[in-house]
Image: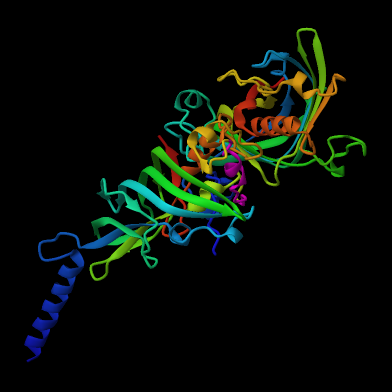
Amino acid sequence: MMRSALLMAKFSAASALLLLLGGCDGSPSEGMVTITSYGEAFIEEGIPADAMDDGWEVSFDNFEVKVDNVALGGQELRNPSAVDLTKKSDGQGQELGTLLVPTGTYDSADYEITRIAIEGFAKKGSAEKTFSWVFTGTTSYRDCEVTTKVSTDKDARFEITVHADHLFMDSLASEEPQFLFGSLADADTDEDGEITPSELKQADIGAYDPGSAGGDIDNLWLWLEALSRTVGHANGEGHCHAHGD
Amino acid sequence: MERQARVRNGARLLIPCLWVASACGGSTEATQVTFPLFADSSEIATITTDLGYEIELQEARLVVENFQFAIAGEAHDASLWRRLSRPFVGTAWAHPGHFEGGDVTGELQGHFLVEWLPEGGSTLGKAKLLTGQYKSMNFTFARASEDDDLDEKDPLLGHTARLLGIASKDSLSIEFEALIDSPEDRQLIGVPFEEDVGEDTDDRLGFQLDPVDPYEKDTLFDGLDFSALDEDGDGKIMIEEASTEEALIDAYNRLRRTFQTHDHFFVRAKTRK
């Protein structure tokens, strides 16, 4: 009896060791990571007037984001379909795909945003302006400040969070910018109610601060393009190092 | 509704770690070298703007705080601040000093009144730098106060910078004064500073204002139509944040945002005399 118990103990220990090593054939364990993109309430429900500093409220009919090359744990999700972040998601965002990643804890992730297409409108009192803008050009978001714990028993998640209010910042240098729509509204010089890229290219950026390297940003379309390259974050408020193409 | 987080400065401050080598447990110790930093006016000369105005500067003073010197950090494969800037690949790529903060391993802390004109050359302080290959410098714009030992009537009081000069074109000559006010804690990142600092490096560091960007050839005063700004025709204009006339407001905004870029500031090593 003693001998059998001893053998059982040794077998259990060996089995546990094999499990730790990742299976009977020695391969590492892997877990599933679901990759999503989420625009939070600002995109799904709109930016209310009290969240802006000049009283304009902004709503989006469409906020399509094309993500590519999501890298986490040595694995990559390539060319997922574009997603419309205005679709209600109960806080879950839109799924881009999944990755099978070796178990472990990962303290960074990378991704790219290659295209942003937005349609929406803004209101202040009786004034209303519509817009339809497309931002192309790839922005790489690297070393995102996130911790993803991958295990075999529970799916992990990595969320590419898009902060729409960044499109209305008044400074690329300040850590506490104001959020304004008025200058964009004033760019509608033909007063047809639509703010076009052509009109924005004719409008000076005024008191907006383009930052230490922004000397060539001298019209509102270039300004919006620059801001569009700041919208990407990770898991809510996690920051990433962003690089344009 | 929750306001979302902001973009942050990418510079990483390594100085506290390296100064206290024992706490960091590093196997290699960096050597600290001290350099005088002075206001170097050698690059200020009469220039011609894009609108054909010849500018002769007579006064250039700036109030700043906390110089940081950075070794090569995360070099952009395009331009600095591309996360924030439009895709102007070619010209910006040619401009040195374009690093996203980099690793700060040198500093000169404090509040400084930098005078390039009428009299430059004064030493601002002694910067402490660890040995390494430096690429850029950062500083924070500040405001002049009574603590700067200024006359109580000095027009710079309460402001960040004062530029005084004469703009000439054809037979026209206009005296201009510009008072620039930078937002609180507004940092300027990526001033070009290329120096290989070794243990035996024995230079002075000149903090320069250059009204002409030597790479893109733009001037600090491009886009300013001085004649049009002189609405009363008295040959004098004032460009400041308090301006109420639309043309002067536009001129102020244009000048301030150009002044707050790293296109017209440099740090260059000079041999000690």
Q: Quadrant of residue A99?
A: bottom left
Residue B225 makes an appearance in the image: yes
Front residue (pair A3, B146): B146
Residue at the spot x=26%, y=45% of the render?
A: A79
Front residue (pair A44, A74): A44
Q: Which color scheme does this rendered protein use?
A: rainbow
Image quarter (top left, top right, bottom left or bottom right) of the C terminus of chain A: top left
Residue at the spot x=50%, y=27% of the render?
A: B92
The picture places residue A165, in percent across and down from the top left corner, at 52, 52
The picture places residue B123, in percent across and down from the top left corner, at 76, 30
Which stretch appears magenta?
A176-189
Is A22 displayed left or right of B253 in the figure?
A: left
In the rendered view, tell whether residue A171 sits above or below residue A101. Answer: above
The picture places residue A74, in percent across and down from the top left corner, at 27, 50
Residue at the spot x=44%, y=31% of the render?
A: B78
Magenta: predominant secondary structure element?
A: loop
In the rendered view, tell whether residue B91 sits above or below residue B77. Answer: above
Numbered marks: total: 0
Q: Quadrant of residue A145?
A: bottom left
Is B78 displayed left or right of A99 in the figure?
A: right
The picture places residue A235, in percent across and down from the top left corner, at 41, 59
